[in-house]
Image (tube, helix red, strand yellow):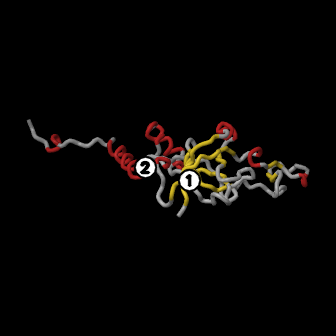
Amino acid sequence: MVYHPSSRKRRFPVVFVPLGLMLLALLSFGCARDAGYSPGGRVLTKTMETTAYCGCDICCNWERGSGQWLYLDFWNRYVASGPRQGRPYDGLTASGTVPYEPQEGFFSWDSVERPWMIPLRLVLFPWYFLPEDGTIAADTRHYPFGTRMYVPGYGWGVVRDRGRNIKGAARIDLYFHSHDDALRWGRRKLPVHIQRSR
Protein backbone atom coordinates (compact mmCIF):
# COMPACT_ATOMS: atom_id res chain seq x y z
CA MET A 1 0.00 0.00 0.00
CA VAL A 2 1.38 3.34 -1.04
CA TYR A 3 1.02 6.20 1.41
CA HIS A 4 -0.12 9.48 -0.08
CA PRO A 5 -0.20 12.63 2.13
CA SER A 6 -3.57 13.79 0.83
CA SER A 7 -5.25 10.47 1.61
CA ARG A 8 -5.13 11.09 5.38
CA LYS A 9 -6.12 14.74 5.17
CA ARG A 10 -9.86 15.21 5.54
CA ARG A 11 -11.19 18.07 3.46
CA PHE A 12 -13.80 20.50 4.78
CA PRO A 13 -16.89 20.37 2.55
CA VAL A 14 -17.22 23.55 0.50
CA VAL A 15 -20.95 23.68 1.22
CA PHE A 16 -20.33 24.59 4.86
CA VAL A 17 -18.44 27.79 4.01
CA PRO A 18 -21.49 29.80 2.77
CA LEU A 19 -23.65 28.33 5.53
CA GLY A 20 -21.08 29.34 8.13
CA LEU A 21 -20.90 32.86 6.71
CA MET A 22 -24.70 33.14 6.80
CA LEU A 23 -24.78 31.92 10.39
CA LEU A 24 -22.08 34.41 11.35
CA ALA A 25 -24.01 37.23 9.67
CA LEU A 26 -27.25 36.23 11.39
CA LEU A 27 -25.56 36.18 14.76
CA SER A 28 -23.75 39.47 14.29
CA PHE A 29 -26.58 41.48 12.68
CA GLY A 30 -29.53 39.85 14.42
CA CYS A 31 -32.19 37.72 12.79
CA ALA A 32 -34.64 40.55 12.21
CA ARG A 33 -35.05 44.17 12.98
CA ASP A 34 -38.13 43.56 15.06
CA ALA A 35 -36.35 41.11 17.35
CA GLY A 36 -35.19 43.90 19.63
CA TYR A 37 -34.89 47.61 20.00
CA SER A 38 -32.02 49.53 18.55
CA PRO A 39 -29.87 51.47 20.98
CA GLY A 40 -30.18 55.19 21.49
CA GLY A 41 -33.36 56.16 23.24
CA ARG A 42 -35.94 55.04 25.75
CA VAL A 43 -38.83 52.75 24.86
CA LEU A 44 -42.41 53.37 25.92
CA THR A 45 -45.25 50.89 25.36
CA LYS A 46 -48.71 52.32 24.79
CA THR A 47 -52.01 50.85 23.60
CA MET A 48 -52.96 52.71 20.43
CA GLU A 49 -55.70 52.62 17.84
CA THR A 50 -54.10 51.77 14.51
CA THR A 51 -55.65 52.20 11.09
CA ALA A 52 -54.18 51.82 7.62
CA TYR A 53 -53.88 53.85 4.43
CA CYS A 54 -52.31 53.61 1.00
CA GLY A 55 -51.46 56.07 -1.77
CA CYS A 56 -54.75 55.72 -3.66
CA ASP A 57 -57.25 58.49 -4.36
CA ILE A 58 -59.64 57.21 -1.67
CA CYS A 59 -57.08 57.20 1.14
CA CYS A 60 -55.07 60.29 0.13
CA ASN A 61 -57.87 62.48 -1.26
CA TRP A 62 -56.66 63.22 -4.79
CA GLU A 63 -58.34 63.20 -8.19
CA ARG A 64 -57.19 62.94 -11.79
CA GLY A 65 -57.41 66.05 -13.92
CA SER A 66 -58.24 69.63 -13.04
CA GLY A 67 -61.54 71.46 -13.48
CA GLN A 68 -59.51 74.35 -14.86
CA TRP A 69 -58.64 72.15 -17.88
CA LEU A 70 -62.08 70.47 -18.05
CA TYR A 71 -60.50 67.33 -16.56
CA LEU A 72 -58.73 66.65 -19.86
CA ASP A 73 -55.33 66.48 -18.17
CA PHE A 74 -56.28 63.16 -16.58
CA TRP A 75 -52.62 62.08 -16.24
CA ASN A 76 -52.06 64.76 -13.56
CA ARG A 77 -53.20 64.32 -9.96
CA TYR A 78 -54.60 67.15 -7.84
CA VAL A 79 -55.64 67.44 -4.21
CA ALA A 80 -59.44 67.03 -4.16
CA SER A 81 -60.37 68.95 -0.98
CA GLY A 82 -58.97 70.67 2.06
CA PRO A 83 -56.61 73.62 2.39
CA ARG A 84 -54.45 72.41 -0.54
CA GLN A 85 -57.38 71.84 -2.92
CA GLY A 86 -56.45 72.21 -6.59
CA ARG A 87 -52.69 71.98 -6.00
CA PRO A 88 -50.74 69.17 -7.68
CA TYR A 89 -50.52 65.96 -5.66
CA ASP A 90 -47.00 64.50 -5.64
CA GLY A 91 -47.53 61.41 -3.45
CA LEU A 92 -44.93 62.45 -0.87
CA THR A 93 -45.52 62.41 2.87
CA ALA A 94 -45.84 65.55 4.99
CA SER A 95 -42.13 65.29 5.80
CA GLY A 96 -41.29 65.20 2.06
CA THR A 97 -40.34 61.51 1.79
CA VAL A 98 -41.68 58.65 -0.30
CA PRO A 99 -43.89 56.36 1.85
CA TYR A 100 -42.80 52.75 2.39
CA GLU A 101 -44.25 49.57 3.78
CA PRO A 102 -41.78 47.88 6.18
CA GLN A 103 -39.37 45.31 4.73
CA GLU A 104 -37.63 42.75 6.93
CA GLY A 105 -34.52 42.56 4.81
CA PHE A 106 -32.34 39.59 4.03
CA PHE A 107 -31.45 38.69 7.62
CA SER A 108 -34.97 37.93 8.84
CA TRP A 109 -36.92 35.01 10.24
CA ASP A 110 -38.41 34.49 6.79
CA SER A 111 -34.91 33.65 5.50
CA VAL A 112 -34.53 31.08 8.27
CA GLU A 113 -37.97 29.56 7.68
CA ARG A 114 -37.65 29.47 3.86
CA PRO A 115 -33.94 29.22 2.99
CA TRP A 116 -34.71 28.08 -0.57
CA MET A 117 -35.88 31.65 -1.28
CA ILE A 118 -32.47 33.18 -0.46
CA PRO A 119 -30.91 32.81 -3.96
CA LEU A 120 -34.10 34.13 -5.58
CA ARG A 121 -34.10 37.18 -3.30
CA LEU A 122 -30.44 37.89 -3.90
CA VAL A 123 -30.74 37.70 -7.69
CA LEU A 124 -34.20 39.13 -8.38
CA PHE A 125 -34.76 41.48 -5.43
CA PRO A 126 -31.37 42.84 -4.26
CA TRP A 127 -33.01 46.03 -2.93
CA TYR A 128 -34.69 43.93 -0.22
CA PHE A 129 -31.29 43.02 1.22
CA LEU A 130 -31.38 45.78 3.84
CA PRO A 131 -34.36 46.23 6.16
CA GLU A 132 -36.59 49.28 5.65
CA ASP A 133 -38.86 50.92 8.23
CA GLY A 134 -42.44 51.57 7.21
CA THR A 135 -44.19 54.95 7.13
CA ILE A 136 -46.47 55.93 9.98
CA ALA A 137 -48.81 58.92 10.07
CA ALA A 138 -49.27 60.39 13.56
CA ASP A 139 -50.13 63.61 15.32
CA THR A 140 -46.81 65.45 15.19
CA ARG A 141 -47.65 67.48 18.29
CA HIS A 142 -47.24 64.22 20.24
CA TYR A 143 -44.81 62.28 18.02
CA PRO A 144 -42.44 64.43 15.93
CA PHE A 145 -41.14 63.29 12.55
CA GLY A 146 -38.49 60.62 13.03
CA THR A 147 -40.12 58.91 16.04
CA ARG A 148 -39.63 55.16 15.61
CA MET A 149 -42.41 52.71 16.58
CA TYR A 150 -42.90 48.95 16.54
CA VAL A 151 -46.44 47.79 15.77
CA PRO A 152 -47.11 44.04 16.22
CA GLY A 153 -48.15 42.52 12.89
CA TYR A 154 -46.75 45.48 10.92
CA GLY A 155 -43.15 45.84 12.06
CA TRP A 156 -40.95 48.87 12.60
CA GLY A 157 -42.09 52.21 11.27
CA VAL A 158 -41.05 55.85 11.46
CA VAL A 159 -43.38 58.82 11.79
CA ARG A 160 -43.03 60.57 8.42
CA ASP A 161 -46.60 61.69 7.76
CA ARG A 162 -49.63 63.27 9.38
CA GLY A 163 -53.31 63.05 8.53
CA ARG A 164 -56.38 65.22 8.96
CA ASN A 165 -58.12 62.58 11.09
CA ILE A 166 -55.04 61.46 13.03
CA LYS A 167 -55.40 63.43 16.25
CA GLY A 168 -54.16 62.68 19.73
CA ALA A 169 -51.46 60.55 21.29
CA ALA A 170 -53.34 57.24 21.00
CA ARG A 171 -53.93 57.15 17.22
CA ILE A 172 -51.63 56.25 14.30
CA ASP A 173 -52.10 55.38 10.63
CA LEU A 174 -49.90 52.73 8.95
CA TYR A 175 -48.89 52.88 5.28
CA PHE A 176 -49.49 49.89 2.96
CA HIS A 177 -48.70 49.60 -0.76
CA SER A 178 -52.17 48.40 -1.75
CA HIS A 179 -55.69 49.45 -0.81
CA ASP A 180 -56.68 45.81 -0.22
CA ASP A 181 -53.92 45.38 2.36
CA ALA A 182 -55.01 48.58 4.07
CA LEU A 183 -58.63 47.40 4.19
CA ARG A 184 -57.52 44.00 5.48
CA TRP A 185 -55.67 45.70 8.35
CA GLY A 186 -58.79 47.65 9.30
CA ARG A 187 -58.86 49.22 12.76
CA ARG A 188 -56.96 47.53 15.59
CA LYS A 189 -56.06 48.44 19.16
CA LEU A 190 -52.53 47.20 19.78
CA PRO A 191 -49.66 47.72 22.22
CA VAL A 192 -47.20 49.90 20.29
CA HIS A 193 -43.56 50.23 21.35
CA ILE A 194 -42.48 53.85 20.89
CA GLN A 195 -38.78 54.58 20.73
CA ARG A 196 -38.13 58.17 21.63
CA SER A 197 -34.92 59.85 20.63
CA ARG A 198 -32.71 61.22 23.37
Kindly tell me whether residue 132 is visible in this rendering: no
**Residue type at mark 2?**
Gly
Kindly tell me whether residue 158 is visible in this rendering: yes
Which residue is the extreme one toward the bottom?
198
In depth, the one of 96 and 184 nearer the eye is 184
Which residue is the extreme one toward the left?
1
In depth, the one of 22 and 29 nearer the eye is 29
x and y, in percent, of residue 185 in the image: 64, 39
- Where residue 85 sits, quadrant-wise, is bottom right
Q: What secondary structure is marked by label 2?
A: loop
Horizontal side, residue 57 vs residue 155: left or right: right
Horizontal side, residue 55 vs residue 156: left or right: right
Which dot, 1 or 2, sits closer to the camera?
Answer: 1
x and y, in percent, of residue 44 in the image: 54, 53
Cα–Cα gap, marks 1 and 2: 20 Å
Count how many numbered circles sit on residues in the image. 2
Label 2 crowd bin: few (<14), some (14–19), many (20+), radius 10 Å: some
Q: What residue is at 46 percent from the left and 50 percent from the top?
A: 36
Residue for badge 2: 30
Horizontal side, residue 25 vs residue 145: left or right: left
Residue for badge 1: 194
Query: In the picture, which quadrant includes the N terminus?
Result: top left
Q: What secondary structure is marked by label 1?
A: strand
Q: In the drawing, what numbered circle is on residue 142? A: none
In depth, the one of 77 and 14 nearer the eye is 77
In depth, the one of 3 and 100 nearer the eye is 100
Q: What residue is at 75 percent from the left and 52 percent from the top?
A: 164
x and y, in percent, of residue 47 in the image: 59, 46
x and y, in percent, of residue 159 in the image: 62, 55
**Residue type at mark 1?**
Ile
Say whether marks 1 and 2 touch (CB < 8 Å): no
Q: What residue is at 57 percent from the left and 52 percent from the top?
A: 149
